[in-house]
Image (cartoon, coloured by chain):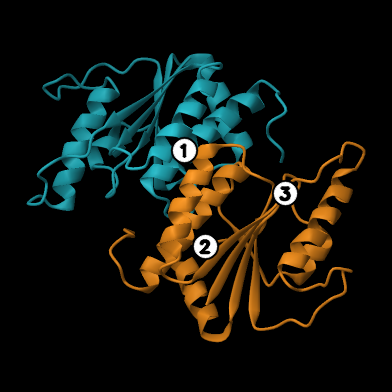
Chain colours: A cyan, B orange
């Protein structure tokens, strides 16, 4: 199965890049993993938060292969789109692993999306299959990526029955 | 106020060290911050999980200045001890900030403790004032430290009304 993590905004810290490389390498042993970074929009000083979310949303949709370059909707294949969102449901690591295992039985591709500072546009919510919350706390974008890549790695070790996760 | 993060186990990854240095430096602008690392116990192959927790617990207590070198309880000063624990209560970032602000009004020292792979001994639970859960998910020790130091930094920016945190 292909697993793609779509993130809005570039990372500022070299330690985040380093950590992401580590987990990305580990994930490569379990799935076709890739992380896609949508660069922070430039010259947005005059835009409202809603407008920024809309623009970011268009770029997210393109990465999900749900819309073509003109924003026209493409047919939805066997894929699941999960948003990392504070309004989502919290899962344990084992529950996340079970979800991934189940998706792997029917889907070709699994997308996880980490939004920008202001969250997702309604259009992005509209195409999402699930919303997942990691915590009641607000984490920095930088750290959420690291955290979630480690969590995906943990999920695959749970699926494979490997001795990494302790309950 | 003095804020001390006590962590069991050394970090394996240089990116974690790098990230911790960054947040530790930032925290230094808001409080007397220090992170204490209790090295992983050696030669524990023959010990049970309970025994490992007990031994780690003794070392934690020493760092909390609650016991002397012989394990004898010392009088409790104006301090709060918070365990990061899956059985704890989840807070939002603003709720954590409010707790820290409240503690700063009465306490001289605030301790946060991140336990080892098997959690805390009953003795450590016994001296804790509060238990805080970051997520239903299980995070790696390495990443929890980074994550929580960023969260402490975020809390102080909230207390000071600085523009770092977005709800």
Count residues near mark 1 (Cα–Cα under 10 Å), then give few for <14, some for 14-19, many for 20+: many
Q: Which residue is mark 1?
A: A146
Q: Residue at x 55, y 16 (%)?
A: A29
A72 displayed left or right of B115: left
Image location of residue B116, percent across then percent down: 72, 49
Count residues near mark 3 (Cα–Cα under 10 Å), then give few for <14, some for 14-19, many for 20+: some
- Examine the rendering and report whether any part of residue B93 can be seen: no
**Which type of secondary structure does the marked residue at label 3 adopt?**
loop
- Examine the rendering and report whether any part of residue B145 can be seen: yes
Q: Nearer the viewer, mark 1 or mark 3?
A: 3
User: In the figure, B114 relative to B42: above or below?
Assistant: below
Q: Which residue is mark 3?
A: B39
Q: Residue at x 88, y 36 (%)?
A: B45
Q: Quadrant of residue B61?
A: bottom right
Q: Nearer the viewer, mark 2 or mark 3?
A: 3
B131 displayed left or right of B65: left
Q: Do discs 2 and 3 share a chain? A: yes
Badge 2: chain ID: B
Badge 3: chain ID: B
């Amino acid at each position: 199965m292909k697993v793609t993590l779509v993130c809005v905004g570039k990372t500022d810290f070299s330690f985040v890049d380093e950590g992401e490389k580590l987990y990305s390498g580990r994930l490569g042993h379990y799935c076709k993993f890739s992380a896609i970074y949508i660069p922070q929009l430039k010259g947005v000083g005059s835009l409202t938060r809603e407008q920024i979310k809309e623009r970011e949303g268009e770029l997210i949709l393109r990465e999900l292969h749900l819309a073509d370059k003109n924003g026209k909707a493409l047919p939805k294949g066997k894929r699941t789109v999960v948003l990392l969102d504070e309004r989502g449901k919290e899962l344990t690591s084992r529950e996340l692993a079970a979800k991934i295992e189940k998706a792997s039985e029917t889907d070709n591709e699994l997308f996880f999306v980490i939004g920008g500072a202001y969250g997702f546009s309604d259009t992005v919510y509209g195409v999402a299959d699930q919303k997942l919350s990691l915590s009641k706390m607000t984490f920095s974008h930088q750290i959420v990526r690291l955290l979630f890549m480690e969590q995906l790695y943990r999920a695959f070790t749970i699926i494979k029955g490997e001795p990494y996760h302790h309950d």
